[in-house]
Amino acid sequence: MKFSNAKQIIGLLVAWALTLLVIDQIKDPRPLTQVLGKPPMIDPATNLKNPHLTIFLNHLCCTGCLGDVREALAKLTWLGKVDIPDEQNLLPQEKAGGTDVTPQSLSAYGNRLEVDIKKVEDVDFVALEKALREVGFVAERIDFGGVRHYRLEAELNHVCCDLCAKGAQQGLEIAQALRTNGASIKWLDSVQVSKEKKKIVAHARFDAVVDVVDFMSVLGHIGYAPSSLTVQADSENPTKAPGQP
Amino acid sequence: MHCQGRVFRWALAAGTLASQAAFAHERFVKHKLKVPLHDDFFLQDPKWTGPLHMQPDMVRVGVNCFVVLGAFLLIWFLRQPIEEFALNKIFRPIGPKAHKWGHLIASFLTDKPVKNSAFYSVGEWALLVYLRVPGLVLMYSATNDSLVMPSFPLEPQSATIFKFAQVLLAILILTQTLLPLCGALILGTYVYLFRWGWYVALDALPVLVVAVAYISSPWSSHKIAIGEPSVQQMRWIRVILGFSFFALGWVKVWNHDLVAGVADNYPSVLEDPMVKFFALGTNPYYKRETWVMSFALAEVLSGFMLTIGVFSRIWASIMAFVFTKLMLIDFGWSEIVHMYPIGGTLSVIFSNKLTSELDFIEAKEERAGREGNNLKQFALIVGPAIAVAFLILFPMIYLLTFTDRAALRS
């Protein structure tokens, strides 16, 4: 039987550690001082990279639809510029009425909007969904991203007892466990439910993109309708010791 | 008891490892303080009436722990005459069966080989658990976006590669293939963890316990049945396991908010009898602070005992029990990482090749006895017990009162 010797083990050990470091550096480039030293703390000033939304609508076939969607989004002051990536190919409303116009597939009716966010602190996804519904649209998916570290806070009108709070906590944990392989809720790092504040706080993984519609459907699935769903990108104010400012 | 500490250290490590420390939140195990601790309890202050400006209740916990540690060391040095007395004066008069069982129990308690077929069989099974269970933890971590243990989150950019690497390593471990390579990969991953800070690496020390057996296995490990670890292997397993708890016990005193935070969220952990015993005679006003102190010193004590090989089976049994309870009852899958130390402790409990680091003192003491130098023999029993217990506890308690914890809250 052949056994390993110190040379082999040290060689493999060093090679493997270097491999991991190199992969880490290639995939997530950082200055050497950060790689070898203490990981940097997130500076609140740089936490907001480029907050934005990608809204997927299964129906947005012409400039008429776009006009209504723009009108709905304009009511939300925290939203910025609204872009539609292939706006030049969007049919004008007057042409879309012609009998000779036939989309090539069902998906050709849909479209995607890229929307900037001006004020992260004012974001409310429930209001966004409501605004779209009021003009007759439903978002299939709303991807929120561009913030490195944040949490979603769902305000609930109804949390009357400890069981309500436990139900929300366990329901989300089960939903996360069940859907992990489906990847839709993989952004979720951890959940806290506060009975006193009537809030569900969902911590997103670092740099994650959240499908807000999916999250609201999960909340609906476990029996909760949030009155607002906001983004908190600030520090969580760790507990101070007595005498500390 | 001490084992509950893994929760705390992994919770902290998660906060340290994730680069978003400024916004650290409660991943897996909740650990936020509900009420702030009295920080000055742990620090130097002229107002304290304890020796060297230390808080008197903190010193009291230290004294309680000192008494227990000293007593265990004394009993260890005197275990031979105690065993002979019990066997000859208590068990033998009852009958040969009682004497045989008394002998087996005494051998188990004093870390001697236990010559019993059932013990051997369970030992063989425990070895399999020890060798293969890390594969399960690695698999679980891979499916939970983590590295090595669930509380070390992976960076999204490199997560896929790290996850596949872990799965590959897990398959090698579970199929007992190329174990020396597995050992080297575990050691290499451990070295890589330093990239995330010394604390993370310290936290992952128990993971190394299994690497010892892997690197000393043959390359053709998949073709053979691996037998009981050798004396040398067992010594490494015991020392690494013990030292990691010893070191992490001290870290708990330093990072007291984290420990108290878990207790605030899981109040049942406050009810541990051993930890309560260490807090005897302290002021109830500082209940949470003295609990943190006693909890940390319980871990220091058990870790130290295992490191030096004093009643290894007893301490390893306590650890295995508490780890299992925490994983199955208190915290669930988030603490599956307990499988690493459970495997290590099982291999210690069922090993018949345990040694002690205090053998050289016992050899001197025995020689003094044979030479009829009773005073020297007495000094060699009592002196080291008191000196070791004192030096292990008080200098470090004192030094920690000078440490600044502000960075932990930034």
Image: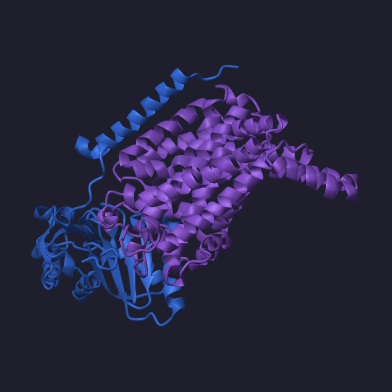
Chain colours: A blue, B purple
Residue B55 vs B113, above or below: the answer is: below
Q: Measured from the top left, where is residue B353 in percent x and y?
A: 66, 32
Q: Is residue A231 visible?
A: yes
Quadrant position of residue B312 = top right
Residue B162 vs B21, above or below: the answer is: above
Q: Is residue B3 visible?
A: no
Q: Measured from the top left, where is residue B408 in percent x and y?
A: 30, 54
- Residue A49 versus residue B8: which sits nearer the camera? B8
Q: Is residue A134 left or right of residue A196?
A: left
- Residue B327 versus residue B316: which sits nearer the camera? B316
Residue B157 vs B173, above or below: the answer is: below
| Quadrant assignment for the N terminus of chain A | top right
Quadrant position of residue B55 = bottom left
Q: Residue at x 63, y 44 (%)?
A: B311
Q: Is residue B212 left or right of residue B53?
A: right
Number of marks drawn: 0
Q: Is residue B290 left or right of residue A101?
A: right
Q: Residue at x 70, y 33 (%)?
A: B369
Q: Residue at x 20, y 76 (%)?
A: A134
| Quadrant assignment for the C terminus of chain A | bottom left
Q: Measured from the top left, where is residue A193 in percent x and y?
A: 37, 70
Q: Measured from the top left, where is residue B407 in percent x and y?
A: 26, 53
